[in-house]
Amino acid sequence: MLRIPLRSLALVLLCAASPRSARGHEFTMDALMNAFVRVDEREVHLVVRVPIFALRHAGFPLAGREVDVAGSGPAIQRALALIKQDVQLWEGDRLLAPSSAVGRLQLPSDRSFDKYQDALADAEGTPAPGTVIYADQGFLDAHLDYPIDSPHSRFSIGTTVFPEVAGFMRLAIRYLPPGEDGRAMVITSRAGRVSLSPAWYQAAATFVGLGITHILGGVDHLLFLLCLILPFARLRQVIPIVTAFTVAHSFTLIGSAYHLAPSGAWFPPFVETAIAASIVYMALENIVGVDLRRRWVLTGLFGLVHGFGFSYGLKENLQFAGRHLLVALFSFNVGIEIGQVLVLAAILPVLALVRRHVLVGRVGIVIASALVAHTGWHWMIDRGEVLWKTEWPPFDAQALAVLARWVAGMLLAIGLMRFAARRAGNLFSRRMAQ
C-alpha cells in the first residue's frame, strides 16, 4: 500500500502582508488545507481545516489586529456555507449534500489534524476563553456529514476554495475507507474531480495518458531517442535498441516507485546531468562512427538513468492510483512505450527521406548529431553547475549498501536487456523473412 506522509504538511506556512484586514491579504507561499474523508456505514465524514484568509467572503469580524472570536458565530456559518459549496464530494456520479455542518476557529499552532479523532474532536469543540487569533493567521476547522447509499461506493472529491489562486491553494486529503489502510493525496482546483477510490481500469487509463504526455513533453528523452536511431536505416535494426532502452528504464522506474532509489537532494540533479551526458555521448558516438552492433549495451545503461528521470514524472501522480500501484506502474510504462512508438512512426519516414534526397550517407548523421550534441552539452553544463552546488551524502556503510544493491540490479537488468533485445531482433527477422 502506498503511503504518503503528510505530517510535515499539517502546519500551514502563511505570510500576512497586513494584519489589519482579511480582505487585503497577500501571501508569498503555497497555501494548504488539511482534510480527512472517513467513510462509515451510512455517512461520509469530511473534517477539514481551512485558512481564514481563504474564507474572506465570510467576513470575520476584527477587533483591531485580532479576530473577534466571541462574535464570529454568524461568520462561521457563512464560512461553512462556502465550504459546502467549494469542497464537493460525489458518490458515483451523484453530488452529495451535507446533512450537518459545525465549525470553530483555531490557532495556527494547533496540531490536532495529525490524527482523525483529534481533528474531529477539535472541529466540534469551542475555543478556550481568551483565545487570540490574529487576522489572516488562524484556521476554521469544520466537520460535515454526508448521507450515502453504500460504504462500498466509489467516492470522488474536488475543491474550488479560493479560486483566485487556482493551483496554489492545495487540499491535503487523508482518505479513510472502511476496512482498509488510509491513503493520502494532495490536489488543487486544477485537478478537477479526483477519484478517492479509483477502479483498476480508471487508474490504468489515467496512467497510460500520463505516460504518453510525459514522453512527448520530455525534450531530453526525445533527443536521446533520436540519437539512438539516427545511424540506422532499417526498422529491424532499431527494434533491439529501443527494446533495450524500454527494459532498462522500466527497471529503475519500478525500483523508484518502491522507494529503492537513492535519496537526498543530490540525486535529482545528478540524474538530470547524467541524462544530458547520455545525449552528448550518443551524439558523439554517431559522429565518430563507433561500432554500432553493441549499441544496445550502452543504450541499456543510459536507459537505467532515464528511468529515474521518468520516475519524477510518476511520483507526484502515484497518489491517484488508489490501491492499484502495480497497475499504475505498468500503465505508465505502457504510455511511455506508446509515446515512443508515435515518435518513431513520425521520425523514421522523415529520416529516410532526408537520407535519400537531402543529406546522403553519413553527412546527414554527422550534422544532425552535431546539433544534438551542442544542445546536450549546454544542458549538461547548466545541470552540472546545479549538481556541483548540491551537498553530497557521506560515503558510509549505508551508502555502500545502496550502491551494491543497485550494481547488482543493473547487472540483472543488463542480462534481461540482452535477452529481450536478441529475442526481439530474431522475432522481427523471422517475420521479415516470411
Image (tube, grey):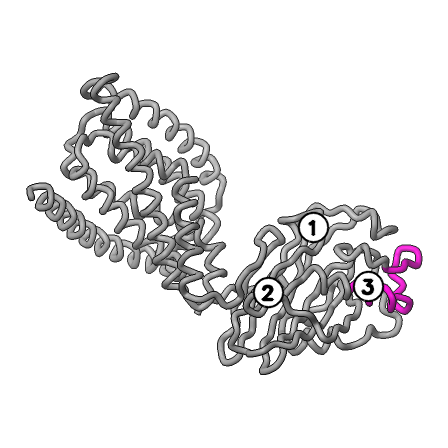
Please give the range of residues in magenta.
Answer: 60-79
Q: How many marks?
A: 3
What residue does disc 1 label?
A: 163
Quadrant of image for the N terminus: bottom left
Q: Secondary structure at mark 3?
A: helix
Residue at the spot x=81%, y=75% of the render?
Answer: 126
* Left or right for 4, reference 28: left
Residue at the spot x=37%, y=62% of the render?
Answer: 327
**Image height of 351 relative to 434, above or below:** above
Residue farthest to the bottom? 41
Image coordinates of residue 361 in percent, x first then y, are 18, 20
* Label 2 vs 3, first from the N-terminus: 3
Residue at the spot x=65%, y=48% of the render?
Answer: 166
**Image height of 121 relative to 25, above or below:** below
- Amino acid type, label 2: Ile
Quadrant of image for the C terminus: top left
